[in-house]
Image (tube, grey):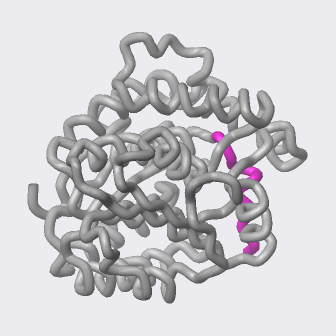
């Protein structure tokens, strides 16, 4: 399977993932100390929602296009910051653009020039790296043609001592990828236990996700937080039932902030013809390990 994110850009999972990334960046920036941010699976910096791939799936309709139409006046601050970023990206590039996670990191660096924040992005696939480098070469983020498994080990611990490693892999072989990613997290954590690690994952095969959680609990990694937003019940086979983010060593109070964000987003991103979900099954923020 050759994964192409262009088919899924701006969908509900992207919206949730990037808003939680914005929240992490905002909270880590509250301390008056420099920090490092790495997007280990950069992909492209920008995606066109007018592309053939995006129009073929139409997934952005249930994601960014739904949120653009929503009233965010009373939304949590991270959602308002996210919408400000969307508006700036569309003003700078074009009205159908959707920014990928490297752009969100670069945008945060650009907005906070005196914060001592250093951002980098890795991309292993040559064509995606070329696009990423071309699109973001003028922005304050280092772009590297590099594999996450080799690259993360080489850059941690960073000179700043504080930082976030953001992982958004394609999951081409779900069961194998979950196991490999746990190994990567454990190896990274052992080398840099003070770091914050955020791993996005799809919720579509509930058995694979539950096994993923069980294996995580058996590791020595402390303070493991899981954030989930589901648009379909987990026992219905629809392709992508929900989206999750595992955060190791989240900033203080991130769990409460994430809970508010997901509760606001769930009715906005809800699929009209989907079976009703209970509040507890629609959004979940819970500690796998620690608190």
In the image, residue 238 above or below residue 92: below
Examine the structure image and report whether residue 281 is included in the region drawn in magenta.
no
| In the foreground, 32 or 57 | 32
Name the residue at the left extreme: 291
Displayed quadrant of residue 64: top right
Asked if one can make out residue 232 in the rendered structure from this viewpoint, the answer is no
| In the foreground, 9 or 35 | 35
Which residue occupies 32% across, 60% down? 35
Which residue occupies 77% across, 36% down? 93
Q: Main secondary structure of the magenta part?
A: loop
Question: In which quadrant is the N terminus drawn?
Answer: bottom right
Q: Position of residue 197 (x, y in %)?
A: 33, 65
In the image, residue 278 above or below residue 139: above
Q: Which residues are magenta?
A: 1-10
Q: Position of residue 62 (x, y in %)?
A: 63, 31
Asked if one can make out residue 283 in the rendered structure from this viewpoint, the answer is yes
């Amino acid at each position: 399977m050759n994964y192409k994110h262009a088919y899924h850009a701006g969908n509900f999972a992207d919206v949730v993932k990037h808003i939680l990334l914005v929240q992490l960046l905002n909270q880590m920036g509250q301390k008056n100390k420099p920090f490092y941010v790495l997007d280990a699976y950069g992909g492209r910096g920008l995606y066109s929602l007018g592309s053939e791939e995006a129009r073929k799936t139409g997934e952005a309709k249930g994601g960014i296009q739904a949120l653009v139409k929503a009233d965010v006046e009373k939304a949590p601050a991270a959602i308002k910051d996210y919408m400000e970023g969307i508006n700036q990206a569309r003003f700078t590039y074009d009205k159908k653009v959707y920014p990928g996670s490297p752009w969100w990191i670069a945008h945060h660096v650009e907005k906070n020039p005196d914060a001592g924040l250093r951002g980098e992005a890795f991309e292993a696939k040559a064509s995606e790296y070329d696009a990423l480098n071309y699109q973001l070469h003028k922005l304050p983020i280092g772009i590297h043609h590099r594999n996450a498994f080799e690259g993360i080990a080489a850059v941690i611990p960073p000179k700043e001592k504080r930082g976030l490693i953001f992982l958004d892999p394609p999951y081409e072989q779900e069961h194998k990828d979950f196991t490999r990613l746990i190994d990567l997290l454990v190896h990274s954590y052992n080398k840099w236990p003070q770091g914050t690690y955020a791993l996005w994952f799809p919720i579509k095969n509930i058995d694979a996700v539950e096994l993923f959680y069980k294996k995580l609990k058996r590791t020595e990694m402390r303070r493991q937080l899981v954030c989930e937003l589901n648009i379909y019940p987990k026992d219905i086979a629809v392709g992508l039932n929900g989206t999750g983010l595992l955060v190791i060593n989240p900033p203080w109070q991130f769990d409460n902030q994430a809970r508010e964000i997901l509760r606001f987003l769930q009715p906005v991103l809800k699929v009209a013809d989907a079976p009703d979900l209970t509040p507890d099954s629609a959004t979940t923020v819970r500690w796998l390990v620690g608190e």
